[in-house]
Amino acid sequence: MTNNQPEKNQADHQQQSLKILPTNLNTDRSSINDYTIPTSSNTLASPTTVIDTEEENDKDKENEPYCIFSRKKLIMLLMITAGGGMLSPLSANIYFPALNAIQQDLNTTSEQVNLTVTVYMIFQGISPAFWGSLADLWGRRPIYIMTMFIYCLSCIGLALSNVYGLLLFFRMVQAFGSSSLIAVGAGLIGDIAEPSKRAGYYGIYSMGQLLGPVIGPIIGGLVAGTIGWRWIFWILLMMAATVLILVLLFVPETLRSLVGNGSGYANPTPSQWIEHRKQKHETNKLNTIFGSTSTSETIITKSRFLQCPDFLAPFTYLLQVDVLVCLTFAGLFYSCYYCYLVSATSLFSQHYGLTTIQIGLCFIPSGVGCVFGSFVAGKIMDKSFRMALNRYKKNHPGVPIDRACIPLDFPIYHARLRTTWPLFVLGQCITLGYGWTIQYNVSLAVPVIFQFIVAFCMVFLMNGAQTLMIDLFPGRGASITASNNLVRCILGAVITVCVDPGIRGVGVGWFFTVRQ
């Protein structure tokens, strides 16, 4: 790749994303979306007035906050979206310990029960392409509500399923509803976090989805072994219903083409709707007294809900070489981490004679590694970005920097990915030795510590790649995250199928060596 190729790719990505921005150049894009027009009361300005107005608008934009939400509000949004993002991987992994119980209860075969796992992963990879495209057009909030409602219905269906066909069907519906939450949540992060702070925000958000594969088997084993496998889905229903209520009450619309920095009004929460009604009532009273009409009112000319989004966008993004290479790079390392999780139960039981509860406790270090890695990765990557931005400002003193838009010649690839390479090398070295420590029955502490290190490294790579994609496709965070999810799920599904045959065929040591 030539020296100018990253800048060219970055320009191409941002040019594509700019298609969703308003086309009226004489209006403030942060306050008037592409589906509204000014009322007829607006008058044409002279050229001098237009120039002065544009200069004033530029100054106003420099002083305007990227997001008007308070720090407490942002933290609340992160916690709610992290909880929603955890549901998809949690639903996938909480199911594993109950497979034998489900097989016996429904009087079916192991192949049929394993098929429910396969279809879940397939829909987990495909459905975000549908919902992510809708979220980038209709807004984050309505998609959150619709998908959470679908997920809740699927949990009820799974808990009440008494035949295999219903179990298979509702498992597909569950994946269809839950997997989109990761993509929509990542889009929300792109809406509320300016580039210099985005990695840190995404690090906090990703804790939920990274903890799902770790705590899922622990919860699933305890529930299935005590009160029955059906209670797994009742518990998931209670968790999802809690998230749905929180979203309904407290998560506002954040899509910047709809509400700008959060000051606009669209897809309101109950409190926003009440406040808007009060303001409208006061405005109408003033208009009645003074006999005037509002000149700032806009007329909605085309509803976004009548528009058909580009559902193929997440797939077409993968046709761009840099996107495909970056997501494949991160996806392969994620699939390596999944090898650890999938193989741990059988390996620790066979080589160390651990019980089910003891094996569950062995997942804790990898969970701690995910949480610790998410926090540290966000801090380090944000600092790396700010260092690169300061160097850019020093080398380009006359270029104005807009917090909402990264300059096309800014070294964004270097700023986001340079901190990931040392962790990639470390993770590969650890993976190389992991299998051999188990094969030769080295102290249990060694492979458990290795799991912690690999989880820590994996978070760096995944967060770096995801943050870069959101930077390259502003306003399309949900769609590009759907692309990431597609690559990750496909690679994860393939490696999951290969783990047991591979270990039986060449041994655990050589399997992880070849995998590395």
Image (tube, helix red, strand yellow):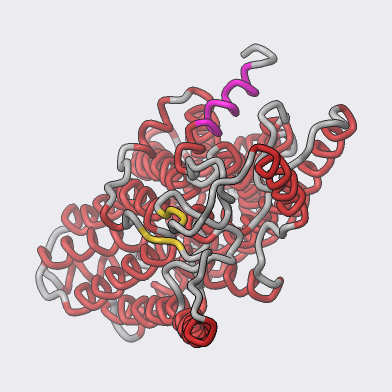
Give the side of residue 151 with respect to residue 481, left or right. left
Give the side of residue 74 with respect to residue 303, left or right. right
Along the viewing direction, whichever of 442 and 40 lies nearer the viewer? 40
The residue that appears at 62% across and 17% down in the rendered structure is 5
Residue 311 visible? The answer is yes
The residue that appears at 34% across and 46% down in the rendered structure is 129
Rendered position, 108 above or below 245: above
x, y percent for residue 494: 36, 39
Secondary structure mostly seen in magenta is: helix
The residue that appears at 56% across and 69% down in the rendered structure is 361
x, y percent for residue 188: 53, 58
Q: Which residues are magenta?
A: 5-15
x, y percent for residue 306: 26, 54
Task: Name the image quarter holding residue 315.
Answer: top left
Give the side of residue 76 with respect to residue 399, left or right. left
The residue that appears at 66% across and 66% down in the rendered structure is 68
Give the quarter of the figure containing the C terminus: top right
Give the side of residue 291 with respect to residue 160, left or right. right
Judge whether residue 301 is colored magenta. no
